[in-house]
Amino acid sequence: MDDLASELGMSKKTVYAQFPSKAALLDAVMAEKFAEVEADLARATAGCAADFWGALRRLLAVMQRQTEEIRPPFVRDVRRSAPDLFHRVEARRAEVLRRHFGKLFAAGRKAGRVRTDVPTHIVIEILLGATQAIMNPAKIAELGLTPETGFRWITTVVLDGVLVRDRRANP
């Protein structure tokens, strides 16, 4: 909190007046980040019924950009120092992915771009499971990946199995 107060040019007392603890500060930062992600994902999936491939590209670009901001030391520190917050973030991330990918996949099915023989909720759970298994600091390091490449591989493997490709409409 000393470093933060110094960087902001205010006293530690002023910072603590707004955020009574480091956990409260971290909670506020994460809430703001989720609001930003939600807004970006809503914009990305707007109009997905009319332009499935464009919406998919936009959704993946948002996810990629958000993933790039996550640094393994931050995740490790939050997991260790604030396990309750870490679990809330994981649950919120899953809920956000379920909602936005669900919306996109439903529109893709109607447009004939997503296979109908694979249940959407199963695809989303596979995507979430792969994300949770690979997008953690220890596994990223073990595999020699960055968060960006890890996410790219997950989406490539999962989506290649559920999308109906049309040579003219390939992203």
Image: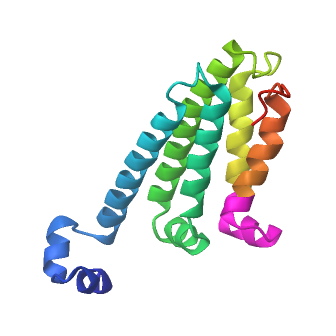
Quadrant where the N terminus sits is: bottom left
Asked where in the image residue 151 lies, by quadrant, the reply is: bottom right
Q: Residue at x 73, y 60 (%)?
A: 149
Q: Based on the picture, tell me whether residue 156 belongs to the magenta stretch.
A: no
- Magenta span dominant secondary structure: helix
Q: Based on the picture, tell me whether residue 141 belongs to the magenta stretch.
A: yes
Image coords of residue 78 (percent x, y): 50, 67
Please tell me whether residue 27 is drawn above or below residue 169 in the rendered image: below
Q: Is residue 125 visible?
A: yes
Q: Is residue 133 visible?
A: no
Image coords of residue 55 (percent x, y): 60, 33
The answer to whether residue 171 is left or right of residue 81 is right
Provide the residue span drawn in magenta: 135-149
Q: Residue at x 54, y 55 (%)?
A: 66
Asked where in the image residue 113 lies, by quadrant, the reply is: top right
139 vs 56, nearest the viewer: 56
Please tell me whether residue 62 is drawn above or below residue 29 in the rendered image: above
Image coords of residue 33 (percent x, y): 41, 54
**Residue at the front extreme, as displayed:** 168
134 vs 44, nearest the viewer: 44
Q: Residue at x 49, y 51 (%)?
A: 89
Image coords of residue 99 (percent x, y): 54, 30
Quadrant where the C terminus sits is: top right
Q: What color scheme is it?
A: rainbow
Please tell me whether residue 123 is drawn above or below residue 58 in the rendered image: above
How many numbered dots are placed on residues in this image? 0
